[in-house]
Amino acid sequence: MLKRHTVTLHQVITVYNEMVDHIDGMMRALAKKKTQWKEDLYFAVKFARQKLSKYFTEVTPTTGMLLISAHILDPFWMLRSFRKWDKIIYINPEDEISYPTQYQQAFLKYVDNEYCTKH
Amino acid sequence: MASRLGQSSYDPYDLYCDDEEYLICNNVAKTTPGRGNRSARVLKAAKLYRNSPPELPPHWGLINLNLNDYHSDPMEISSIFWLPDITDWWGHQEETHSKYADRSNVARDIFSIIHYGVGVEASISLGRDVFGWKQSKTTGKTHRETIFVKQFARTNDGSLAGKDPVLDPTSTDNNMEMKSEVKQKKLHRMAKVHNFLEMWQGSQNREAK
């Protein structure tokens, strides 16, 4: 991302999503392979996913609000990525526990705390 | 709430999503009672922004994840990384005094942060050890090389020569190689002397005749 001489913060979540999707696809493709090097690759990819999960689960409204805010402020994606996550686990997007709802509220709270109360 | 991981399986190729919900812009822009005009306007813009549809949906139809191609550049797989520059979009909003103009200062503050300085990225990124917050114009190549050199030296007790066996003078193989090189040079020098002696002898013989 450093190749682009422009802002990249808003793409962190997008890149994480792409990496997770790619790793999941790889794991599915390699799951039933019997060749030794493919089995080795499967386990390597599995550990890579664990590592990625460890970091990605840190992106929460508490610990990763800047990343979430930056992603929401991207006018081309906004809450679209988070809405996809709800589809995965079959949660109604309008539900209170849905990702977009929680992140929307967290974003508004962040703006309220950081800007509105200070002016 | 954690992010998406640790949840049930899903289809990673489902990159199309239903945007109907986004197209319903209900403009819930209610001002907060008891606040100043500016505060209310900023919050109103934030609410308005998050309820508006995304701009210019990216070309998702072009995305083609080919999992059999292990050598392809992942950055070339998807077109999502080549979206228009969002700083231009926010700048335009500010210039045209659009309904999101009050939100542009939030965008400016947040987007000025370098990605490897935030949250978990700061803890895993090696770049944070090398460059400061404001050196955002460093190219990726320079960044990569600097980190490589630093890490290489760090893992080799500060020595850039490292533990390269070719450069190790105590190695027997290297000694043999060096000895053979010295021998070759010596032979070359001896050959020169031998040739000189032959030439000298030849001239002596011609003089004697």
Image: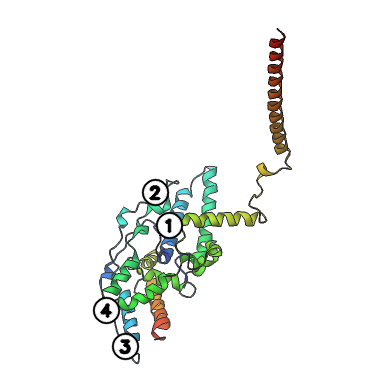
Badge 1: how crowded within 10 Å, few (<14), some, or many (20+)? Answer: few
Please give the label number shown on residue B27: 4
Counting residues from the start of the chain, the first of labels 3 and 2 encountered is 3
The residue sitting at 43% across, 64% down in the picture is: A12
Q: Considering the image in quadrants, where does the C terminus of chain B appear?
A: top right
Label 3 and label 2: CA atoms lie apart by 53 Å
Chain letter of the residue carrying label 4:
B
Label 2 and label 1: CA atoms lie apart by 24 Å
Q: Which tag is nearer the camera, tag 1 or tag 3?
A: 1
Picture quarter containing residue B100?
bottom left
Label 2 and label 4: CA atoms lie apart by 41 Å
**Which amino acid type corresponds to the residue marked 3 in the rendered image?**
Asn
Question: Is the residue under label 2 in contact with that under label 3 (CB below 8 Å)?
Answer: no
Asked if both marks, 4 and 1, belong to the same chain, the answer given is no
Question: Is the residue under label 3 in contact with that under label 1 (CB below 8 Å)?
Answer: no
Which residue position is annotated with label 3? B37
In the image, residue B70 above or below residue A104: above
Is residue A111 in view from this perspective?
Answer: yes
Which residue position is annotated with label 2? B66
**Which amino acid type corresponds to the residue marked 2 in the rendered image?**
Asn
Badge 4: how crowded within 10 Å, few (<14), some, or many (20+)? Answer: some
Q: Which tag is nearer the camera, tag 4 or tag 1?
A: 1
The residue sitting at 67% across, 43% down in the picture is: B167
Counting residues from the start of the chain, the first of labels 4 and 3 encountered is 4
Task: Name the element at disc 2.
Answer: loop
Which residue position is annotated with label 1? A3
